[in-house]
Amino acid sequence: MNESSLKKSLSKLKLGGMRYFDSIGSTNDEALAWAASGAKDFSLVVADEQTQGRGRLDRKWFTPKGSAIAMSLILRPSAPMRPHLSRTVGLAALSLADACQTLGLSPKIKWPNDILLNGRKAAGILVETVWSGVEADSLVIGMGINVSASSVPPAESLKFPATSIEEMLGYAPKREEVIQLVLNACLHWREQMGTDLFIQAWEEKLAFRGEAVQIQAGDEETTHGRLDGLEADGSLRLRDLQDHSVTVRFGDVSLRPAA
Ligand code: BT5
């Protein structure tokens, strides 16, 4: 992938703008700065390599040269989208899942922000907001996708096992084609963001649905329960051991199958 092959693949999409980097610290940092200085809706930052790629809570995200996708999409929320901004991570997850499915894979969404292939993490999402007072001026959807096998970090550096599209498909698709699939799916799901169908589609793709899981949120005690589904705002719903409904909100949450 290079700037011109990417531009060619995305030529039919109405992007607000595009910035491509052979190497960058973090595409989310670039997109946040661009959004704050007036980037148009649906502008895209893509890099071949990230040297300071970030996950949640500034955890490191590994994007070695020539093997992965690091992209950040800037959305300026329209009036109908505004009441549903808490669903933005779902928009990203459904877009990534659709792209994987089009490639012939069977993705699952590990709530809130991971895409699993065969139970292993193949992509991560980091949504960040540019605020204007109390209003969200724009959203930056950062997506990191392991395309080639060489994008997968060493197992000993990970808390959750990882994989790549190549490991699952037997070949590495062109990264610019994967980006095109993700953006097309995003255009579709963005229009549906306020609908019940959106929540249903998101719910259907959840990993561990109906299974026993444990949730660790920050320093709080671990919650044990069965993964039930999603609330209207995209929060996760569990049934605890007493069969009570428990809502888990977004944040520093890690979801695991029950030990
Ligand atoms: C995430 O965080 O999964 C969000 C990752 C978002 C990355 C994109 S790339 C484009 C944009 N620019 C950025 O700077 N970021 C976004 P979290 O759930 O906190 O998971 C982070 C953890 O995933 C790390 O602590 C590692 O254990 C693991 N990890 C790091 N690199 C990985 C990779 N390439 N594949 C699988 N797991 C990885």
Image (cartoon, rainbow, N blue to C red):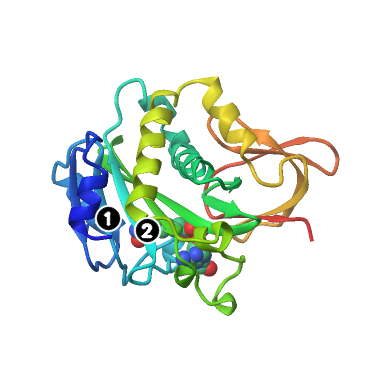
Q: Residue at x 55, y 22 (%)?
A: 197
Q: Check disc 2 and report its element: helix, strand or loop.
A: strand
Q: Residue at x 37, y 72 (%)?
A: 64
Numbered circle sitting on residue 46: 1
Q: Residue at x 41, y 25 (%)?
A: 83
Q: Spatial distance from mark 2 to mark 1, Cα to Cα?
A: 8 Å
Residue 51: % across, % down = 31, 72
> Is the shortest distance between ligand 1 and the CB of mark 1 under 8 Å?
no
Name the residue type under label 2. Answer: Ile
Whether residue 84 is situated above or below residue 71 in the rendered picture? above
Name the residue type under label 1. Answer: Val
Residue 50 visible to the viewer: yes
Q: Residue furthest front?
A: 171
* Residue 72 horizontal side relative to residue 18, left or right: right
* Residue 209 horizontal side relative to residue 94, left or right: right
**Mark 2: few, some, or many residues within 10 Å (few <14, many ≥20)?**
many
Residue 118: % across, % down = 65, 55
Whichever of callouts 2 and 1 sits on the residue coming sooner in the sequence is 1
Numbered circle sitting on residue 69: 2
Whether residue 11 is situated above or below residue 19 in the rendered picture? above
Residue 24: % across, % down = 24, 67
Taking depth in this image into account, of 246 and 255 the one nearest to the observer is 255
Q: Residue furthest left?
A: 37
> Is the shortest distance between ligand 1 and the CB of mark 2 under 8 Å?
yes
Q: Are marks 2 and 1 in contact (CB under 8 Å)?
A: yes
